[in-house]
Amino acid sequence: QCSVLLCCQSQDVFQQPEIRWSYVNKAAHMNCSHNKDKGHNQMYWYIQRPGETMRLIVYTVFGGKPDYGGAPENKYSASKEAIENGALTVNDLQQNDTGVYFCAVSKHSDVRSRRSCTKTAQQLI
């Protein structure tokens, strides 16, 4: 048995590999990079399973710790070691991990001000 993981491409955000096949109980690794300006230091990973809506897996920011929200950290592992790129690993693959995996990048809504701002615009690119 195997799982199929698909990645989407856009003009400014690139995911590799585009199609990823792997066996159940194995791990699948995906990379994401962008050529947007350096203000786009936030990265989001989403999954859309067949017949379902898109769901956020993890949010990462360069220099910060990944925020998995409600997603189990032992299932997903995300890294962002540079502003322009990041990676997602799906561990212990099961059939229900089959789906389309989206990477999105975002620019913080308040990059010039010194005040604290936590609201972030999410945009799929």
Image: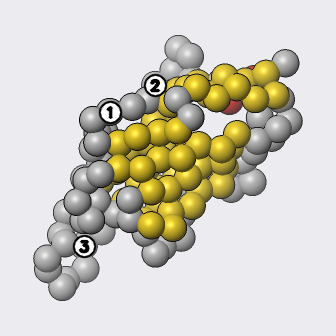
Of discs 1 and 2, which sits in the foreground? Answer: 1
Q: Is residue 62 visible?
A: yes
Picture coordinates of residue 18, whole percent (x, y): 52, 29
Residue 82 position, x and y percent, is: 45, 67
Name the amino acid, label 2: Thr
Q: For mark 1, what is the residue?
A: 10
Dot placed on the residue nearer the N-terminal end, 2 or 3 = 2
Residue behind mark 3: 117
In this view, which residue lies farthest toward the bottom?
114
In screen coordinates, is 8 left or right of 109?
Answer: right
Point out the image quarter for the N terminus.
top right
Residue 19 location (% of width, % of height): 58, 26
- Mark 2–mark 3 Cα distance, whole angstroms, equals 29 Å
Label of residue 53 in the image: 2
Q: Amino acid at mark 3?
A: Cys
Label 1 – label 2 distance at C-alpha: 19 Å
